[in-house]
Amino acid sequence: MNAPARALKPKDYASDQEVRWCAGCGDYAVLKAVERVLAEIGADPAGTVFVSGIGCAARFPYYVATYGFHGIHGRAPAIATGVKLANPELDVWVIGGDGDMLSIGATHLAHTLRRNPDLTLLLFNNEVYGLTKGQLSPTAPPGSRTPTSPLGSVESPLSACRFALAAGARFVARGIDTQKDLTGILRAAHDHPGTGFVEILQNCIVYNDGAFAAITERATAAEHQIHPVHGEPLLFGAARDKGLRLAADGSGLEVIEIGADGAGLEEVIRFDRTNLALATMLASLEPPLPVAIGVLYDNPAPVSYERALRAQEEAERARIGEADLGAMLRQGPVWMVTA
């Protein structure tokens, strides 16, 4: 992909379309973060494509001054894979919501993650269907009262990050719509050679306002979030006086208090972003335990899907030469069907 003729600023990636999300929607912050990343990497608008499905998040391609494809419900990962296979030089981003990608689109998402094409895939999670007026989504917690669960949901919710890890994703991260470090998380996902999957906790101010307030309130965020750093101990808290260690029964992670003299620090796990088991445990944390924000898993595959496929095609072309499609269709037994 060629760099643009001149250095572009974040505002240069904003299209001339009126941004039509509800006032106060977290999508505005995500859009600004993406524009900053595009400017940082010097993205060529003519070589960049945003693909979306259906939902509030799916408006995204209209608001970025690049190429875009507004697909149908749940199919954005499959469409984006086709775009990347057709032209591997394109920088392809995929945008969708939790309802779009984890309900009707769950199969497409799973197979995209296991194939690992070089895409940057953003899943906006607001735990509700926003565009169609607040129905229950696959990530909604038990007890959620919505038009489709008026007595409160009795379903077990899907964890987007655990889903991605189970499907074979090689890069999994979680961010928060309004946090400054979202830009860094998106940049890391983009730089990953393969599918970079990011779940973004995004507030729907109309139908599910405050869904993540327990972990995002500034006054208490330090106590309710943990930000893993590769090679560093898993510490959190305003005074960095709490850490995570493996539970005695090996079932998961538990909190340990760190003494003023550093007592207990030796029991705290050091984060390794290539450790799949640890990533799965971090992705599973939920209140009252701290929620993991940042890159949870980053372990690149030897080669991305589209490059492996292209190498296979080139080797076969070298073996047999350029094929004649017409001749191939007519080889072997051929017969004519008549009335």
Image: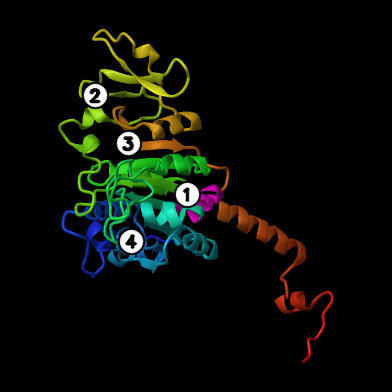
What amino acid does circle 3 point to? Ile
* Amino acid identity at mark 2: Gly
The answer to whether mark 3 and mark 1 are in CB contact below 8 A is no
Q: Which residue is mark 2?
A: 237
The Cα–Cα distance between marks 4 and 1, rounded to whole angstroms, is 22 Å
Q: Distance from label 3 to label 2 (Cα)?
A: 14 Å
User: Which residue position is annotated with label 1?
Assistant: 195
Q: CA distance from mark 3 to mark 1?
A: 19 Å
Measure the C-alpha gap from mark 4 to mark 3. 24 Å
Whole-Å distance between the Cαs marked 2 and 4?
A: 36 Å
Residue 189 lies, in percent from the top left, at: 40, 46
Sequence-earlier tag: 2 or 4: 4
Disc 4 crowd rating (10 Å Cα; few below 14, some 14-19, many 20+) is: many
Tag nearer the camera, 2 or 4:
4
Residue 273 visible: no
Magenta-drawn segment: 108-119
Q: Give amino acid for label 4.
A: Gly
**Classed neighbour count for the residue bearing mark 2: other residues with Cα under 10 Å, few (<14), some (14–19), many (≥20):** some
Q: Which residue is mark 3?
A: 293
Which mark is first along the chain, 2 or 3?
Answer: 2
Q: Is residue 212 visible?
A: yes
Q: Residue furthest front?
A: 151
State whether the magenta stretch is mostly helix, strand or loop. Answer: helix
The image shows residue 274, relative to residue 335, as above or below, that is above
Q: Residues within 10 Å of mark 1 (few under 14, many from 20)?
A: many
Q: Residue at x 48, y 40 (%)?
A: 165
Vertical side of 305 occupied by 282: above or below:
above
In the image, what residue occupies the spot 55% across and 42% down?
A: 301
Q: 4 or 190, which lies in front?
A: 190
Q: Can you identify the residue that label 4 sits on?
A: 55
The foreground one among 313 and 178 is 178
